[in-house]
Image (tube, helix red, strand yellow):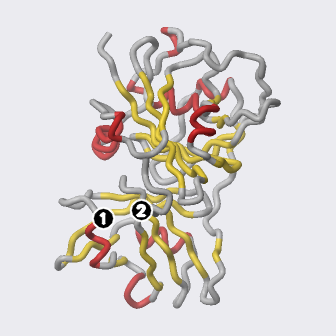
Amino acid sequence: MADDSELYPRFFKVFLVESASESLMIPLPFMAFLADPLPKTVKLQGLGGKLWTVSLKKISGAAYLTRGWPKFAEEHELKNGEFMTFVYDGHRTFEVSVFDRWGSKEVRAEIQAIPLSDSDSDSVVEDEKDSTDVVEDDDDEDEDEDEDDDGSFDEDEEISQSLYPIDEETATDAAVFEGNLDVEALTNPHFPTTLKNRIYELLIPANVVKDNNLEFGSSIKYIDGEGTLVGLRGKWADKRVCFKGWDRICRRNRLKKHQDTVECELLHDDQKMVHSIRVHVLRRDA
């Protein structure tokens, strides 16, 4: 388990129109936290919930955010003298906070919550390349259902790859989350799960929450090989912690019954507030 005082690596930058409108240089000391060789792209997650794919290039020994950065700057309406903090999760995603010239944190480039009913979940997922969906579910499901019920998609529910074409970048990302994961090497709290009858919500085991003194907010960010998806917290009479939108993670990763296991890694800050769930898909041959 990581030490309580451990923080994700971070840096801050002042936005100057003349030098940062087209590209942004990452501080040289911070390059020690980046992979070598540099990944071709990284994700920028704004406080408004949206996600941008930005090219990362090495120029004269320094790393620069290039293609995609002008769009991020424009949509955040960055002004001369404002500054930003970049928090790196270690897996090609930066959470970016924007502050005005007086030091007040600004929430910009917000996305709208997308209501999602159970019937809507069977439809093709929208393109998520440059944005993060926020998933709500207003349908109240039976709260008495056993959390450990086994379940799976029927054969006619299994999603073919043609519905989810994977480009070269996505396939590269997916390799991070699939394969021979060394579960014992994970330093964050984690737990395994498989397909359940209750596929629309992910239930966080009570013992994991209690043993690690974890706290949860009103939403969570799922991180898998295809990007990021935000799920809103569900309501249970017994106060169990669960988050909606899990069915979309299962479907877009094409999980198979009795074969695939998902190791859910809970990413939290130094106050034990969980902000993200990193999804590791473990495939097993039939």
Near-viewer residue (29 or 43)? 29
- Give the mark nearest the N terminus, 1 or 2: 1
Residue 29 at x, y percent in the picture: 29, 77
- Residue type highlighted by circle 1: Phe
* Residue sitting at x 55%, y 32%: 248
> Residue type at mark 2?
Tyr
Residue density around tag 2, few if under 14, some if 14–19, many if 20 or more, within 10 Å: many
Dot 2: element: strand
Looking at the image, do the residues carrying marks 1 and 2 touch, with CB atoms under 8 Å apart? yes
Relative vertical location of residue 120 with respect to residue 18 in this rendering, above or below = above
Q: Does residue 199 appear to the left or right of 90 in the view shown?
A: right
Name which quarter of the figure residue 240 lies in.
top right
Q: For numbered disc 1, what is the local secondary structure?
A: helix
Q: Which residue lies most toward the right here?
A: 237
Q: Which residue is mark 1?
A: 33
Quarter of the image with the C terminus is top left
Q: Depth check: give the residue in front, 282 or 121.
A: 282
10, above or below 136, in the image: below
Image location of residue 39, percent across then percent down: 26, 57
**Residue 98, quarter of picture:** bottom right
Horizontal and vertical percent position of residue 18: 40, 90
Whole-percent x, y for residue 237 in the image: 82, 30
Name the residue: 32% across, 18% down: 284
The total of numbered circles placed on residues is: 2
| Disc 2: which residue | 88
Q: Nearer the viewer, residue 275 or 119?
A: 275
Q: Assess disc 1: are there few (<14), some (14-19) or many (≥20) residues with their C-alpha within 10 Å of its C-alpha.
A: few
Q: Which mark is residue 86?
A: none
